[in-house]
Amino acid sequence: NGGCGYVLKPPYLRHNNTIATNSMASSSLSTNKFTPNSYSSNTPRILHIKIISAIHLPRPEQAELKANSVDPYIVVQIFGAPRDCDETRTKTIYHNCENPQFNEAFEFEITFPELALIRFVVLDDDSLDYDFIGQYTLPFECIQPGYRHVHLYTIGGDLIANAYLFVHIVINSKSLAVVCFL
């Protein structure tokens, strides 16, 4: 946006450039409401995320009265248009908060990338409750492919010092969805 502060809406949200895929979409144009099931995106993407590990996870604040061990797992959530919303989780790594190794890959289809948010949530798997450890949320359009450190934040938005996830990200168009993780 050239630093001007203005971000242009995606083409399917602009009234004069919207392409309807069926007759129901024509009625939604007249009411000025966005109905994702009646539009086709020109740029569907396949997001491949491999959660490799986490480093220096703190103990949850609620865990002071519980056992000393932390049993972390990671939830990856996609928020956006209803057809893009999804959630998945890794396996639990027991008794390891310093450097848990997950090595799990996930695949998500993102139909409206301009509207999608990706959220990483780290939780402590406890028989009594699921305690929050940290999170990070970013727009899909801001994700850079490759190996990345994802810094974790508290639920209040404060940075958790030295705590992060190590992930590998690949983004393909739907027609090029074949990918291998090394």
Image (spheres, rainbow, N blue to C red):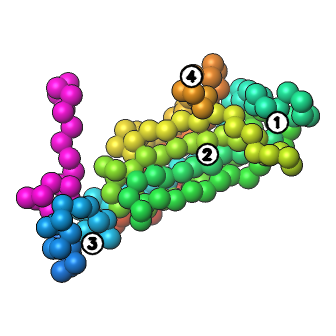
Q: Is residue 148 magenta?
A: no
Tell me where residue 90 appears, x and y as whole percent.
68, 52
Mark 2 vs mark 4: in front: 4
Q: Dot 3: within a 10 Å radius of its alpha carbon, few (fewer than 14), some, or many (20 or more) residues? A: some
Task: Name the quadrant of the N terminus.
Answer: top left
Which residue is labeled 4 in the image?
Answer: 158
Which residue is labeled 1 in the image?
Answer: 70
Residue 173 in view in this figure = no
> Which secondary structure type mostly characterizes the magenta part of the structure?
loop
At a point 71% along the width and 45% down the height, the residue shown is 73
At a point 59% along the width and 36% down the height, the residue shown is 135
Which residue is labeled 2 in the image?
Answer: 51
Q: Amino acid at mark 1?
A: Val
Q: Is residue 17 magenta?
A: yes
First in sequence, mark 1 or 2: give its number: 2
At a point 61% along the width and 56% down the height, the residue shown is 88
Mark 3 vs mark 1: in front: 3
Magenta-drawn segment: 1-19
